[in-house]
Image (tube, rainbow, N blue to C red):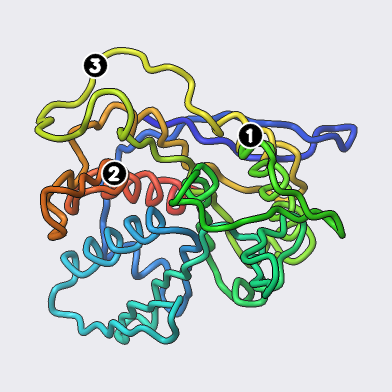
Amino acid sequence: MVDLITNTSGIDGSPLVVTFQVMLVNRFDGGKFLERYRGKKIMFVGDSISNNMWQSLTCMLHVAVPESNYISTTLTKHLSVFSFPEYEASIMWLKNGFLVDVIHDKERGRILKLDSITSGHMWKGVDVLIFNTYHWWTHTGESQTWVYFQVGDKIIKDMDHMEAYKIGLTTWSKWIDSNIDPSKTTVLFQGIAAVHSEGESCLGQTQPEQGPMPPYPGVDIVKSVLSNMRNPVYLLDTTLLTQLRIDGHPSIYTGRGTSYEDCSHWCLAGVPDTWNEILYATLLGN
């Protein structure tokens, strides 16, 4: 059973958050999924965690219909497409770690524009959109991929990263409300996947964690932003699931040697398959 959040309007027109549960009674059926989305386009938009989920779904669908031909292409530097010609269905991943704009300024370097989205045209005309953004916002030091924030004409050197995340996510939410027709496009937010790079390492872990977990940074921001949207956006609330799965990471087995320990991405087959079980229940259950 999984909790999902959607946003509808109350009697007085004010936002109303509805929490409901989807029971995974019907297990993932790739053939049924492809039949339901025959002739449709499904797009994941986000960072490498979004890529994790996209790869998982394409594998699960291929395994379900192994005799059906598929085409896997990289159309641009940032857009990958896995299609099933028999079903005229396309499963896409568009790499976009922040959703809002990042520009290259010759004098200042990379600037993260918190109130600007110019790449949204690539999200239009798609039947199902699954967005994800979080991990890049938490980076600091050498892993930080920007130098300045910008809001309007104001250039900001230092800002609390979670405050910036909230502003950026709110910009995305307003773009969705203004540009997406919910009668034609289903929009979901992938949610925040936990990392295990602090505290107890994921190296050598073979069993999930047990018991309750502490609140995870960013989750309340996501739920707050979604609850204030006019259009319905479904949250795949998988944070607790991933907090428990300290055993699900590639660790040192990424092909990059033992000096690199990956405790943020996920093994396949593995945890992302469960995300797609939830995605299946959400899409085919509604």
Q: Which residue is mark 2?
A: 274
Instruction: Please report whichever mark, 1 or 3, sits nearer to the chain's N-terminal start.
Output: 3
Q: How many marks?
A: 3
Instruction: Please report whichever mark, 1 or 2, sits nearer to the chain's N-terminal start.
Output: 1
- Label 2 and label 3: CA atoms lie apart by 18 Å
Q: Which residue is mark 1?
A: 221
- Tell me the number on the disc at residue 253: none
Q: Nearer the viewer, residue 103 or 9?
A: 103
What residue do we see at 18% from left, 71% from top? 65
Residue 286 x %, y %:
51, 49
Residue 72 x %, y %:
28, 82
- Label 1 and label 3: CA atoms lie apart by 26 Å
Q: Secondary structure at mark 2?
A: helix
Q: Nearer the viewer, residue 271 or 65?
A: 271
- Mark 1 vs mark 2, foreground winner is 1
The disc labelled 1 sits on which kind of residue?
Ile
Q: Secondary structure at mark 3?
A: loop
